[in-house]
Image (tube, coloured by chain):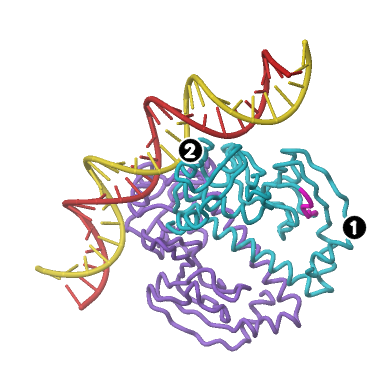
Chain colours: A purple, B cyan, C yellow, D red
Amino acid sequence: MSALHARLVVSTGAARHMARNETIFDQDDRSDRFFKLIAGTVRLCRHLPSGRRQIVEFAMPGDLIGLVDNPYQTLAAEAVTPATVIGFSRDGLEHSASGEPALRSDICVLYLEKLRDTQRHVCLLGHSSAKQRLAAFLLRMADRLVPRPDGSFELPMPRLDVADHLGLTIETVSRAVGALKKDGLVCSTAAQRFILCDTAALRALVSEA
Amino acid sequence: MSALHARLVVSTGAARHMARNETIFDQDDRSDRFFKLIAGTVRLCRHLPSGRRQIVEFAMPGDLIGLVDNPYQTLAAEAVTPATVIGFSRDGLEHSASGEPALRSDICVLYLEKLRDTQRHVCLLGHSSAKQRLAAFLLRMADRLVPRPDGSFELPMPRLDVADHLGLTIETVSRAVGALKKDGLVCSTAAQRFILCDTAALRALVSEA
DNA sequence: CGAAGTCTTGAATTCTATCAATAGGGGTGG
DNA sequence: CCACCCCTATTGATAGAATTCAAGACTTCG
């Protein structure tokens, strides 16, 4: 376990249970607290003046959310499913980090990983078709989610969240799902349950971007 | 001056002059070195298997480029204009940072700023029209570039680079420029020279995203 | 069983990409 | 100094992809 997570384990933090669609923190909240996600899925998104919403990333159990340097959060965090988080004080972490360089180093690595992920997402949104975006998303989700014995996995988020993450509309996402099914690349018994039938072809499709 | 830049000043680093379109480092190069950009503009981009290119960001004088934790670079750096860079060894910086916590802290802040910028770019690419993307880009460039006495500024990059940054084609960028000119939001005497006539309206246009 | 929310499907519109051709601009050499 | 050439930018016509608007189907839950 990294120095960062070891430190969080011994820190005081109260567990909070969040209902579906409940806001953990808003994009204008003071960033004096951050959270570790214990269970459930959380969307990190930006609400645009037009009422539109861009989901920058989804957080899954084990992820830290809301840990930034600015005085205010830049993204809002909302529970996609019922979720459990543990809150920590940023001052507390800062204090620990000033005496424990390995901690700061871990935080650095964390930021860098997020930066890489976000850069990849820029590339995805820059030039790719709806089918390619969905294929990339499903491949990534298959990696992050624990599969069932039959190899299927259950997306925690509804179509609207997928759409707002991929920069598409729900209708387009729905049609893209249909297209991938028709092509035999994925199977889907329920709206949020998928089996990737041909991961090689899915990867090839993504590479064409 | 931050501890980071102070450290770089006293470090040994050889200045390199790069010609237009010359590669400073490639996306598969070992990341044992990083660079400080002294003069010129550099594009940080990813070359996709399809031959397409996504420019994630532009670097300007003072920016550090290629400083990552992975063993390999994730983005390529290419000179948009003739450019001057100073190279540094990552090991050297790591060594300094292990004895000087403020250094590590500065690097952390740097990553976080880049992360915020990249997140903003995700929002821009997620939902906005060509006109909105261009308006946001021009506003940002007006902030980063030094204006001439008459208030105009010169874009260092050609249309193709703008297009690959905004996820558009050169034709669409060209038409978007024409549209903003027709609307009276910008003036343009030469292809790369602009005056923002109505920044309020430009900002409003961006906010509509 | 009914109702609300989510998802899918259809048709028309809008926006961007693509293909193709023309125009402008900067530099070189005559 | 001018003509030419190369590179970049603009403009036009068409096709394609995604959005939008609208309606219908499926789930889930009370």
Q: Whole-percent x and y of residue B178?
A: 49, 39
Q: Whole-percent x and y of residue B64?
A: 74, 57
Q: Secondary structure at mark 1?
A: loop
Q: Is residue B116 above or below residue A207?
A: below
Q: Residue at x 86, y 61 (%)?
A: B9
Q: Which mark is residue B175?
A: 2
In the visual, does B11 lie left or right of A148?
right
Q: Which mark is residue B12?
A: 1
Closer to the chain start, of discs 1 and 2, is 1
Chain where mark 1 sits: B
Magenta span: B33-39
Camera sees residue A138: no
Q: Secondary structure at mark 2?
A: helix
Q: Whole-percent x and y of residue C7?
A: 31, 57
Separation of residues labelled 1 and 2 (CA atoms)? 47 Å
Q: Is residue A100 above or below residue A105?
A: below
Circle 2: residue type: Arg
Q: Nearer the viewer, residue B39 or A136?
A: B39
Camera sees residue A170: yes
